[in-house]
């Protein structure tokens, strides 16, 4: 059994998780704080300052709730990317300091891989088509030849980004999620008409920026907002589902797993259920609590990596803002 | 009907009404068996006026809004038919069209007996795989010269006949007024289908593809499309970071 403390700070959430491998429950601690900007989107520097001021408190809380001391921890894991530079640096600095001071091995974790690994752990999916949807990421992947290979992704903005920016520009948000429902989803419930908006699927990729611009133009021209919400949501979700379907058939998989912050959408889930039924696949959706960014997923992936011998010297543990999921070797899974 | 399968009910009605107007569908068209299922269509092996044929039907998708669903199915059917017609006019091998019914999202086309390039790659010599990649490259360049992008140029959408002839299939996502972006995306999609399913050979095969592409549009044309692919690949991946840079 290994005990790993993991630190997440790629965007707006600073999270510290402690996990123990080969043990249930495997989660010993799960502490998080989330930066919510007063207006507009995340300002990376503001988010980083917020984290830096409170990080020590979160680490202390995680250790207290886990009931262990740092000396009992086998390794420190940290999300080194992808994400916002200033925010990543907060987590990386703390992780390097803890590892140096307590002489613990340091384990580098890719944030996207962590979303996948916690999804596999919690849903029990074995070899699924992975659909990773969040504020900053939209990608469809599957495990092949030792890595999570990307089959399709957004050519411009991410699905979560599309929904949030549309909400912000039309005054529906922030906050973007109210009682677990995205404000665009909620607004779409009142929609009746499907309006003419661009539906873009290019092979195995999607693109959303044209859709965003066209939708905002419709609103400006006086179209009924709920109709625009409905049309926008239908185009965007259907495009992702179509790409996932292509991947499912191209790779001969029988499972689909949805992870990331947007996975919480009940409406998207319903659509995926229909799709899975149509193609005889099983659908797995990561529980909402672990769909969003958290430290547990970093700790859990750190435990897998550490057990497979993956560590990084402290002086080489630098952040990588654009670290792609398909650049990471996954030695803990059989190819 | 030889070794026949029952038609799915809505399809049965459509074919009776559309093709004959009277109850004589079997002489015109008969479905022999289900051949396969793509992401959006069902494929039936069929006989059309005695010729071996493929009937491609895009059935309704329950997860889509009904109005949007019929719109997409109709548009894709029309797009596919137009693109096949234009590709064949350029001398590119693609299954000949026999019958198109956009209202019901049905295309009947020539049956081409062959193996998917995707399945052929692991079973054949690298030289043969390279030759095919080259042909695909020439096809892509010919289409691009005419302002057409295939839209889903993967190794699963290339059929290789026993005699080595290479056929492009599945034009449902084609763009018939393609700009540089659409062309770049075509090449990007092909590159990634190599990368994701044939990762140990992709550099070699992509090189063969580009040689074929350059044989039509010249090396400067090939370089232009490669530059576009590079640009596409660098784009949009981590939007948060791009936003961070802008401020």
Image (tube, rainbow, N blue to C red):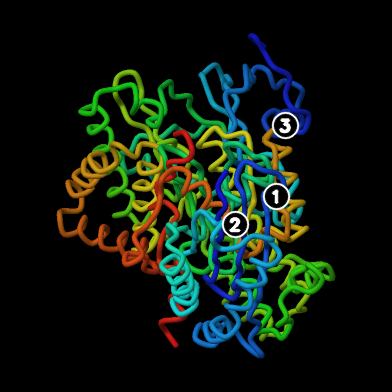
Residue A82 appearing in the image: no
Q: Earlier in the sequence, mark 2 or mark 1?
A: 1
Dot 2: element: helix
Residue A191 appearing in the image: yes
Compared across the picture, whether A317 is left or right of A73 comes to: left
Outermost residue, right direction? A190
Q: CA distance from mark 3 to mark 1?
A: 34 Å
Residue on which disc 2 sits: A297
Say which chain tag 2 marks: A
Compared across the picture, whether B240 is left or right of B133 comes to: right
- Name the quadrant containing residue B87: top left
- Look at 66% across and 86% down and name the residue there: A220
Compared across the picture, whether A84 is left or right of A263 comes to: left
Which corner quadrant holds the C terminus of chain B?
Answer: bottom left
- Look at 44% across and 24% down and name the residue there: B112
Dot 1: element: strand
- Name the quadrant containing residue B223: bottom left
Q: CA distance from mark 2 to mark 1?
A: 15 Å
| Viewer-proximal residue among A63 and B180 | A63
Number of labelled discs? 3
- Look at 63% across and 49% down and name the residue there: A119
Outermost residue, top direction? B2
Give the class, few, some or many, for how many residues have Cα within 10 Å of label 1's Cα (few <14, many ≥20): many
Say which chain tag 3 marks: B
Q: Is residue A71 above or below residue A53?
A: above
Residue on which disc 1 sits: A285
Q: Is residue B80 above or below residue A184?
A: above
Q: Are marks 2 and 1 on the same chain?
A: yes
Q: Which mark is residue B11?
A: 3
């Amino acid at each position: 059994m290994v005990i790993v403390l993991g630190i997440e700070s790629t965007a707006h959430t600073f999270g510290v998780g402690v996990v123990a491998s080969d043990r249930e429950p495997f989660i010993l601690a799960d502490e998080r704080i989330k930066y919510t900007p007063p207006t507009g989107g995340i300002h990376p520097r503001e988010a980083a300052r917020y984290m830096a001021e409170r990080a020590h408190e979160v680490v202390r809380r995680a250790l207290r709730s886990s009931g262990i001391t740092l000396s009992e921890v086998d390794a420190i894991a940290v999300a080194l990317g992808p994400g916002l530079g200033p925010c990543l640096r907060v987590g990386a600095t703390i992780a390097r300091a803890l590892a140096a001071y307590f002489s613990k091995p340091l384990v580098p974790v890719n944030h996207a891989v962590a979303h996948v690994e916690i999804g596999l752990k919690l849903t029990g999916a074995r070899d699924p088509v992975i659909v990773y949807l969040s504020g900053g990421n939209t990608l469809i992947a599957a495990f092949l030849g030792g890595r999570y290979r990307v089959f399709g992704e957004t050519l411009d903005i991410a699905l979560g980004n599309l929904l949030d920016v549309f909400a912000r520009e039309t005054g529906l948000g922030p906050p973007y999620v109210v009682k677990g429902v995205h404000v665009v989803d909620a607004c779409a419930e009142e929609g009746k008409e499907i309006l003419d908006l661009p539906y873009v699927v290019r092979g195995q990729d999607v693109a959303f920026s044209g859709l965003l611009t066209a939708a905002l133009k419709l609103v400006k021209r006086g179209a009924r907002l709920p109709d625009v919400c409905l049309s926008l949501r239908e185009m965007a979700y259907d495009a992702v589902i179509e790409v996932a379907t292509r991947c499912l058939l191209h790779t001969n998989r029988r499972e689909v797993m949805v992870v990331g912050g947007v996975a919480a959408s009940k409406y998207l889930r319903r659509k995926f259920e229909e799709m899975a039924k149509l193609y005889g696949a099983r659908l797995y959706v990561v529980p909402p609590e672990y769909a969003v960014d958290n430290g547990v997923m970093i700790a859990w992936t750190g435990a897998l990596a550490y057990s497979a011998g993956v560590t990084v010297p402290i002086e080489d543990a630098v952040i990588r803002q654009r670290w792609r999921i398909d650049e990471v070797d996954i030695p803990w899974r059989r190819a | 009907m030889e070794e026949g399968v029952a038609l799915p009910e809505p399809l049965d009605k459509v074919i009776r009404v559309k093709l004959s107007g009277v109850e004589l569908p079997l002489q015109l068209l008969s479905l022999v068996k289900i051949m396969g299922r793509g992401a959006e269509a069902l494929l039936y092996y069929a006989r059309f006026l005695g010729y071996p044929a493929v009937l491609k039907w895009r059935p309704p998708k329950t997860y889509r809004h009904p109005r949007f669903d019929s719109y997409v199915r109709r548009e894709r059917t029309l797009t596919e038919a137009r693109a096949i017609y234009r590709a064949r006019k350029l001398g590119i091998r693609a299954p000949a069209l026999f019958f198109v019914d956009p209202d019901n999202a049905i295309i009947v086309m020539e049956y081409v007996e062959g193996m998917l390039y995707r399945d052929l790659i692991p079973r054949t010599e690298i030289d043969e795989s390279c030759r095919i990649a080259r042909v695909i490259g020439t096809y892509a360049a010919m289409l691009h010269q005419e302002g057409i992008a295939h839209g889903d140029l993967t190794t699963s959408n290339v059929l290789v006949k026993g005699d080595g002839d290479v056929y492009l299939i599945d034009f449902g996502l084609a763009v018939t007024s393609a700009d540089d972006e659409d062309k770049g995306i075509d090449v990007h999609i092909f590159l990634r289908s190599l990368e994701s399913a044939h990762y140990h050979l992709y550099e070699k095969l992509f090189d063969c593809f580009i040689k074929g592409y350059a044989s039509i549009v010249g090396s400067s044309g090939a370089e232009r499309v490669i530059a576009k692919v590079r640009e596409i690949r660098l784009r949009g991946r981590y939007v948060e970071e791009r936003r961070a840079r802008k401020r």
